[in-house]
Image (spheres, rainbow, N blue to C red):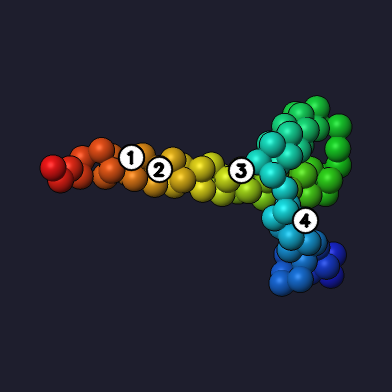
């Protein structure tokens, strides 16, 4: 019972450090690291504890990639909307 309390996630847990570490990664860095993590998990040669840590890191990396992609989509949408607005505004003659 004491062992499960020791390893249960809580505030200030190692997963918080993982998230902070990942926050500074570029899209390409996060994607490459995610590919490495998935490959390691697929090999199945890690302990359960290592697999859980890899899974948590992979989830955080996937979230980071998603943040980058959502941000890129927003920028493209804004540029597209600006282009449409400027081309559809009536010209004064």
Q: Verify CB contact (< 8 Å) between mark 2 and mark 4.
A: no
Find the residue positioned furthest to the front: 93
Q: Secondary structure at mark 1?
A: helix
Identified at 78% across, 49% down, the residue is 53
Residue 4 in view, yes or no: no
Q: Is residue 56 left or right of residue 69?
A: right
Q: Secondary structure at mark 4?
A: helix
> Which residue does the numbered mark 4 point to in the structure image?
21
- Sequence-wise, the earlier of marks 3 and 4 is 4
- Sequence-wise, the earlier of marks 3 and 1 is 3
Picture coordinates of residue 88, whole percent (x, y)? 21, 40
Identified at 44% across, 47% down, the residue is 74
Q: Secondary structure at mark 2?
A: helix
Identified at 28% across, 43% down, the residue is 86
Picture coordinates of residue 89, whole percent (x, y)? 20, 44
- Sequence-wise, the earlier of marks 4 and 1 is 4
Label 1 neighbourhood size at 10 Å, few (<14), some (14-19), many (20+)?
few
> Which residue does the numbered mark 3 point to in the structure image?
65
Judged by depth in the image, the label closer to the viewer, 2 or 4, is 2
Q: Verify CB contact (< 8 Å) between mark 3 and mark 4.
A: no
Q: CA gap, disc 2 to disc 4? A: 31 Å
Q: CA gap, disc 4 to disc 1? A: 37 Å
Task: Please give the label number shown on residue 79.
Answer: 2
Identified at 15% across, 45% down, the residue is 92
Q: Verify CB contact (< 8 Å) between mark 1 and mark 2.
A: yes
Instruction: Indicate the quadrant where residue 48 lies.
Output: top right
Task: Please give the label number shown on residue 83.
Answer: 1
């Amino acid at each position: 019972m004491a062992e499960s309390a020791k390893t249960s996630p809580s505030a200030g847990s190692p997963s918080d450090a993982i998230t902070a570490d990942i926050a500074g990664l570029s899209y390409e860095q996060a994607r490459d690291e995610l590919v490495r993590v998935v490959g390691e998990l697929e090999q199945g040669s890690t302990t359960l504890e290592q697999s859980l840590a890899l899974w948590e890191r992979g989830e955080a990396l996937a979230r980071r990639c998603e943040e980058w992609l959502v941000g890129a989509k927003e920028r493209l949408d804004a540029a597209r909307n600006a282009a449409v607005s400027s081309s559809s505004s009536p010209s004064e003659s």
